[in-house]
Image (cartoon, grey):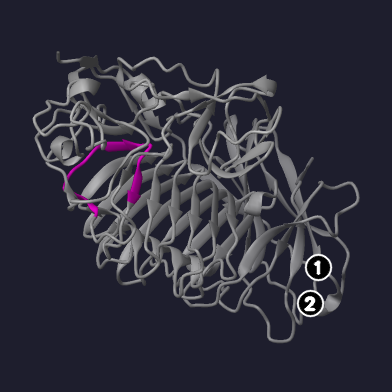
Amino acid sequence: MTKYIFVALIVLTSFFGFSHEVEATAYYISFDSASTTNCASTNNGLATTSSFCSLDQFTEVARTAGDIAFVRRGYATTTGVTDLNFTSDGTIANPIIISADYDNNWGDFASSSQTYTIAVATSTFTASAAQSQIIVGEWVYVEGDCSEVPPNTLATALNQCEFAYEVASVASTSIGLYLPYKGNQTGAGKNLRILSSTTLGSNPQWNVASGDFQWNFDTDNHWLVKGMDIRGTDLNGQVELDSSDHHIFFDTIFTGNGASDVGFGLTDDFSYFVLNKCRVFNDDFGINDSTLDHWSRITIIDSIFDGNSIATSAGILGGNSSQSSNNVSISDSVFRNYTSGDLDRFGLGIIYGRNVSLKSAIEISSASDYSSFYFEDYDGLMGDNRQNLVGAGTNINISLLLSTSTLRSGGGPTAIEVRPTTNTTSIWDFNKIKLFDYPIYTNTTSKQYDVYFRNATSTTQFTTDPLATELWIECEYWAHDTNATSTRKIKKSTGVLDFNGNANWQNLSVTCQPTQTGIMYLRAYYAKTKESGGSNIFLIDNTPVIQ
């Protein structure tokens, strides 16, 4: 009997949310081809007892936006595999979904024989006694985080079992996870659910790492893939996105064969996709975004990229300035074991990182011309905010980073250390360094804003002082007292600091008086080219004084 799913409101990511109802169909897929009861070529896929045998039966036939295919865990399809093609589009409100079973649809989940102690933000669960039941590669969740109620809406299909985790290691009285636990359970005495009682116990596996096949999205938009294990050695990627956009991959593993493999190949025109709680392993390029004339927007959340030390490997490979434009947002993620760089050769790229750990020997390739990299909580260190500005050249140095080594008495708890490069210049905006940008809610009272600076170590840092046009602070405030559509005016400081003869804290000042109450922006810029006679490193007290 056909099982229908009535699709309701769901916020897909932090970027978009829509409300729309459609009538969609649930299908079931099992790779257990040895059992004619569970998988036969004549099955209609509408129940677990008449499930499809392959993903092809779902993807290569026209589907309706909101259709969902549930795939049984614990089994793999490794023979007779061909490229997986797609024929249908979802919509921005109702994607088409391929999801591993999180709801015990086949009745084969198991409970742990021991209880565990759980803590948020750790990757180790400690068992109450010795255990041998849970093995590496299985997926588990803490009871209470998931309901195992088959979803009847798109919202529950997307959010069902948000906090399941892949087991990375096991010991006699503990298990280790690839990612830190972020669920809602804490304390001792917690039972775990194992998302398959078979010996495989992992995400449904499609293909083998040495198989030259892929998932090929070619003008196929709005798909959600959840809880799969996708393998292959195709040069265009285990997953290829060709003129396709709005894809989300959640809890999914991508594995290459260790030789010229690509996790994600972005080939032609444009792509926009999200990776959330994913693991990309043993690929020459985790993401290859170097195609000629390609534009991409990529969001990576809570994921691991591991190059397994493959020669010439890169976590994300962009293009040079004439090829591609990349806009990448990365948060709570790790890149490691890449020989050419965690981030390599970005063209007209902007990378935003929040709590991103770059663990390879080369973090950002020196070939990343014309790119800008912004990091908050770099390498997981709270408050370590960095800015790598490449500018028009290949010299990549850290321009800004957090410092606690030299602080101003009575000032803030941290300082900003500025390390200019030979590409820094006042000639044009591409090579000026924005030191900070603080929004301040203020009224129409005239106020003076002071920001303090000093040499990093000694007066030998500078041969000549920065001019007022090379180091200044400014405020941008509302400038018309009656116009409701008023614009803002910028007022700059005019003072000059003594950097080549003074190692004390010194301030630049600017006095500003908005004509309307609202947000004013206080900023600082640096634009002096690094001198040959000194390193030009200086500090900023990042707590302005307002009087």
Of the numbered discs 2 and 1, the one sitting upstream in the chain is 1
Residue 267: image location, x then y, percent: 24, 60
Query: Could you tell me residue 40's position as x and y percent?
Result: 14, 32
Residue that mark 2 sits on = 461
Q: Circle 1 is placed at which residue position?
A: 456
Mark 2 and 1 residues: CB-CB less than 8 Å, in contact? Answer: yes
Q: Residues within 10 Å of mark 1 (few under 14, many from 20)?
A: many
SS at badge 1: loop
| Range drawn in magenta | 214-230
Query: In percent of the image, x 40 and y 66: which residue is there?
Result: 258
Q: Residue type at mark 2? A: Gln
Q: Is 179 left or right of 52, judged from the image as shown? A: right
Please state the horizontal and vertical placement of residue 302, each as a whole percent of the image: 51, 43
Q: Nearer the viewer, residue 398 or 306?
A: 306
Q: Amino acid at mark 1?
A: Ala
The stretch drawn in magenta includes residue 518: no
User: Residue lying furthest right in this view?
Assistant: 409
User: At 59% across and 29% down in the image, what residue appears?
Assistant: 517
Q: Position of residue 416 (x, y in %)?
A: 73, 57
Depth order, front residue of 133/203 = 133
Disc sitting over residue 507 in the figure: none
Looking at the figure, which quarter contains the C terminus?
Answer: top right
Left or right: where does residue 173 sit relative to residue 112? Answer: right
Residue 66, can we see it?
no
